[in-house]
Image (tube, helix red, strand yellow):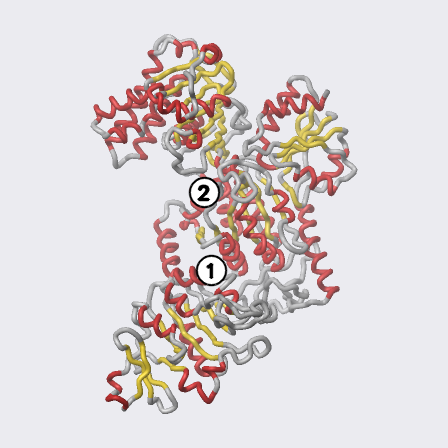
Amino acid sequence: MKLANPELSVWVSMGDGDSMAIGGNHLIHAVRRNQDLNVTIFNNEIYGLTKGQYSPTTKFGQVTKTSPFGTIDYPFNPGELVMGAQGTFFARTLDCVPQLTTECMTHAAQHDGCSVVEVLQNCVIFNDKTHAAITDRAVRDDRTIVLEHGKPMLFGKNKEKGLRFNGRLLEVVTLGQDGITIDDIMVHHEDTEDTGIHMMLAHMGGDLPVALGVIRNVKKVSYTQLYEEQMEEQMQSGKYKCMDDLLNSGDTWEV
Amino acid sequence: MSENQIINKEDLVVRFAGDSGDGMQLSGTLFSDASALTGNDIATFPDYPAEIRAPHNTIAGVSGYQVHVGNHIYSSGDKCDILVAMNPASFKSNLKWAKRGATVIVDIDTFTEEALQKAGYTDDPFTDEFERAYTIIKAPITSFTSRIGDAVGVDKKTAEKSRNMFALGIIFYATHKALDHTFAYLERKFAKKPQVVQLNKAVLTEGYEYADKLEVMHSHIVEVAKADQMAKGRYRNITGNVATAWGLLAASEKSGRRLFLGSYPITPATDIMVELAKHKSLGARVFQAEDEIAGICSAIGASYAGALACTSTSGPGLSLKSEALGLAVMTELPLVVVDVQRGGPSTGLPTKTEQSDLAQALYGRNGEAPLVVVAASSSANCFYWAYEAAKLALEHMTPVILLTDGYLGNGSQLFRIPKMDDMPAISPRLATPGDTEYRPFKRDPETFARQWALPGMEGLRHRVGGLEKAPEGNLSTDPENHALMVRNRQEKVNRVANYIPDQTVTGNPDAELLVVGWGGTAGALTLAVEELNNEGKKVAYTHFNYICPLPKNTGDLLRRYKKIVVCELNSGQFANYLRSQFPECAMTQYNKVMGLPFEVGELKEHFNSLLG
């Protein structure tokens, strides 16, 4: 659609099934080419429309209709796939935080190139509370971190905790403890071209808070722009201006 | 040139065969181009291996290119009058394509013990019986070229690559043709490598002069008749795949819709994408997708956005596109799917031709999913059938499958260049912005086609998708609505029959026997029927290009004949399709599923047996 009419703002709405399984190939290639599409992945870690089978993002070991003894599939992390494909934009948000979701979508729309927004979504019927461990009001501040460009990576109810790179891994530290000051805390740069830190941030979970907000947003000429430039150049300089030119090109003769 | 006796012939078949690196496709193309430029009608047929580089000197690595030149040429010919065999393997595998009495030219330097063994020979291949049956020219091509290579100052490998020019030189001598066209080609092609130009020109000339010195050649020079029945006009040589690409481009220009092609490389369809990728200046938007599914889905998206959207593929690729074809049927968007058929099933015979995707094209989708199917019947008319496929898609808001095949796609033919002004108008069914009466599935009372509203058109916001919808555009699981929509989608395709010409009969229309063909077999069938009628037999012939729907008079036409034989390169898919619609007509079949086109000889033999 975007190639046929570059004027359009094209949005692709996906779930964890079509983005990570049946359409996984298409997603990574759209990301790799940096096609100017806005992709939203509503990740509820389950196949809901088919009534509760495990998906490529279902937590390891989870019991579902098709994994009555627990899954033995290691799940995908959509953010890591995007980084792996050298994606230029990745943001993550929660279904229960509309303001953050709006911000992520707005940044995605403004980004030239392929932007992917993962929305951690609850499935009330088939996978209720799958994200509860991070989304419940009681724990949300401690289990998630909202990244902001140019600001230190702080989280917790009173922003008393932060992330530090210890030379090997990311770790959680508390301001004021063991001599930790704000200067020890990493500052988020969404525009770092190298995917290394962004990959680590997208990967977080477990002992580390789940990263939310715009994790990666780098400038790279989009497929759409490159395509239009080539079209424009050929339209100007191309040998054939109309079909009659082409039909009569090369070796022809009169009978 | 010394005093020669020149034999005049109506037509001549030359087959170039060698190892896949021997440049046989190029020799064949240069010979056919030179012939076309000097007034012959032509048809060519490349027969090459699937392996890019099979082991040297093996049968698997043999590449062939057959050229048929003469006055009025329908096909690339059954068997050849002249065979060029550059090594023992090509000699062994291609001798069966030579007529008895044919002239066989070999590079005798390659007939070493080792190469003979690799080709599976245990004894001398030139038996007394062989020498009696054929005129054999044992040319020391390799030694000649390496001597010239030394003189020009190129390495051995480069010199060896020009061996094909030596063979071509002999052929030009044998067919009484000048070398200037090929000289000009070499100068163009290797403009930046003067040494290579010098080498190839010298080798070509040496081959020509070598032939002049051969006593046997002097009684074997053939002057092939020039085409005298060709309609006046400007001509060029064209392959079916290029003609298909150009037909789509022409339809785009005529309809004013941007051309979009979303495709994934697959033999033998790739050249359509390769050709269109060159023509951004004509507005062709080509997208090389990550797979067949992405190819067709990107095309459906482009169609939704208002482009003349196409995808090109071959058999197994069409299988992968099946589900998305259903989406195109359901969304009722214009879409052209080109299937350059090859031997199947599965990966099958990628470089060989067949007509075995017909059933898949007609029925290969889930649900009741009717669409339009048309088939090209010559390399040159791929242009017009691609154009017609696009016209039908745009005017009837339906996916259209265009069936060609490896034989048509890779083969080449003379093409009378049309003027764009003379091409029929194409009127896409675009909706009018702001039309308050617009409903996504409201139908034209005549064609049953819906209107094409594009995203961005004022006031025409709507959705399309795979789920069943009511005419107003909302999702609906209502049983009556589903039944209605199924009927309407079918009726829309049926009504295409109101916009296509009647089926015609050639040959002797009053005959008892009717030969029925479709698609890429027209050349051999036409010639077989023509020859039989010339021999005093009575045979009628009808050839189908509109497959679904069939022309409206098809039933009346078939019912006129007592004996019907449906000929096709599959096990009877078109015959069964006709039987399902006209059970009152008794039909016999003539089928060939060998990855090869029909031969005129086998067809005549079979028709003769039916005539009794």
Q: Amino acid at mark 2?
A: Asp
Residue B247 point in image, percent of width and height:
51, 43
Asked if badges 1 and 2 are on one and the same chain, I answer: no
Depth check, front residue: B25 or B415: B25
| Whether residue B499 is situated above or below residue B152 in the rendered picture | below
- Under circle 1, the secondary element is helix
Name which quarter of the figure residue B142 lies in: top left
Residue B67 as seen in the image, left or right of residue B112: right
| Whether residue A133 is situated above or below residue B602 in the rendered picture | below
Residue B498 point in image, percent of width and height:
69, 46
Give the label, 1 or 2, closer to the camera. Answer: 1
Crowd band around label 1 with a 10 angstrom C-alpha radius: few (<14), some (14–19), many (20+): some
Q: Amino acid at mark 1?
A: His
Mark on residue A246?
none
Find the residue positioned furthest to the right.
B584
Question: In this view of the protein, can residue B576 be seen by the observer?
Answer: yes
At x 60%, y 77%, the residue is: A125
Tag 2, which chain?
A: B
Q: Quadrant of the N terminus of chain B?
A: top left
Depth check, front residue: B347 or A248: B347
Name which quarter of the figure residue B141 lies in: top left
Depth check, front residue: B224 or B85: B85
Residue A234 point in image, percent of width and height:
37, 51
Mark on residue B271?
2
The CA span between labels 1 and 2 is 24 Å
At x 57%, y 39%, the residue is: B376
- Under circle 2, the secondary element is helix
Query: Residue at label 1?
Result: A26
